[in-house]
Amino acid sequence: MKKIYLLLFVVFFQNIILSQIGGCFDGISTITFSPIEETNDIRMTIESQSCDVHYMIDSNISSNNSEHIINVCYLNTGLNLQTSITNNLILSNINISGEQNITLNSSFHFGNEANCSSPIISSDTFNFVLSTPMIASRQFILSNSVFDEKKISLYPNPNNGVFNIELPSQIDNAQLNIFDISGKKIYSNENYSSDDTIQINHLAKGLYLVKVIVNDTSQIVKFLVN
């Protein structure tokens, strides 16, 4: 039987909350599915957070019967102010009958261009099963638990290209990738141990980003070269 793929219409609205309190990571924190009265549509509310000002730059949804794939991507602007963003996607004609399987692929990017091909800071995939028709909202709390206990710290900051990174106590080693503000990778270490000294010669003055990867989870730390 020939498979039919439908592109669902997507409408999204964006609310931004700025904060400098507490820990942060680049990723999705909460997903809420809510039925829309007198329709077969479901509102999917995606709350994301970042250590910097960020916003959603693209989203698309494809559907094959009861299988739905949602792709969203965000741009991290590099402006150092923790943000929480709420985006609402309208999933058309999905609140019908039976189980609906939803896959959400999210990615966070940085660089000079606002597009989904910019260098990736972090990415995650989440899977949800909804029994329809829904009559009440369902909320899913997500977390980036690897880094919950203690934030990664980089010192000294600012520096001259010589510095150390302290990992959370439960992490023995991590993969490091360091980028300049344009997104160019300038350093990589596949097996970094906490507090090992990093020395990168001849770095120009400016802002740099360290992507710390543990398993499939990542966190961004920024530093200045003066």
Image (cartoon, grey):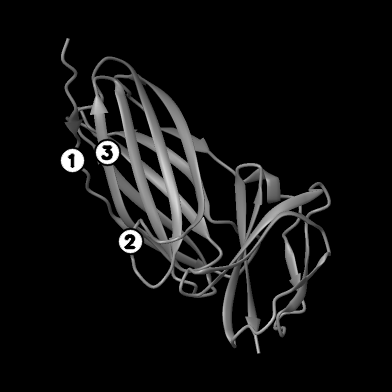
- Image quarter of the C terminus: bottom right
Which residue in the structure is indicated by mark 3?
Answer: 61
Residue at the limit of the structure toward the front, as seen here:
201
Frontmost residue, 49 versus 73: 73
Q: Is residue 56 left or right of residue 216?
A: left
Q: Nearer the observer, disc 3 or disc 2?
A: 2
Task: Find residue 184 and report its horizontal and vertical position in percent.
Answer: 50, 69
Residue count near mark 3 (Cα–Cα under 10 Å), binned few <14, some 14–19, many ≥20: some
| First in residue order: circle 1 vs circle 2 | 1
Q: Which residue is mark 1?
A: 9
- At x 47% / y 38%, what residue is drawn? 125
Give the spatial CA distance, label 3 vs label 2.
17 Å
SS assignment at label 3: strand
> What amino acid does circle 2 point to?
Asn
Tell me the tag on residue 115: 2
Q: Can residue 226 be seen by looking at this rendering? A: yes
Q: Is residue 73 above or below residue 37?
A: below
Say which label, 1 or 3, has the lower sequence index.
Answer: 1
Q: CA gap, disc 1 to disc 2?
A: 20 Å
Q: Position of residue 18 (x, y in %)?
A: 49, 68
Give the structural element (helix, strand or loop) at label 2.
Answer: loop
Asked if residue 140 is positioned above or below residue 192 in the image, the reply reads: above
Quarter of the image with the N terminus in it: top left
Seen at 33% across and 61% down, the residue is 115
Quarter holding residue 63: top left
**Residue 137 seen by the camera:** no
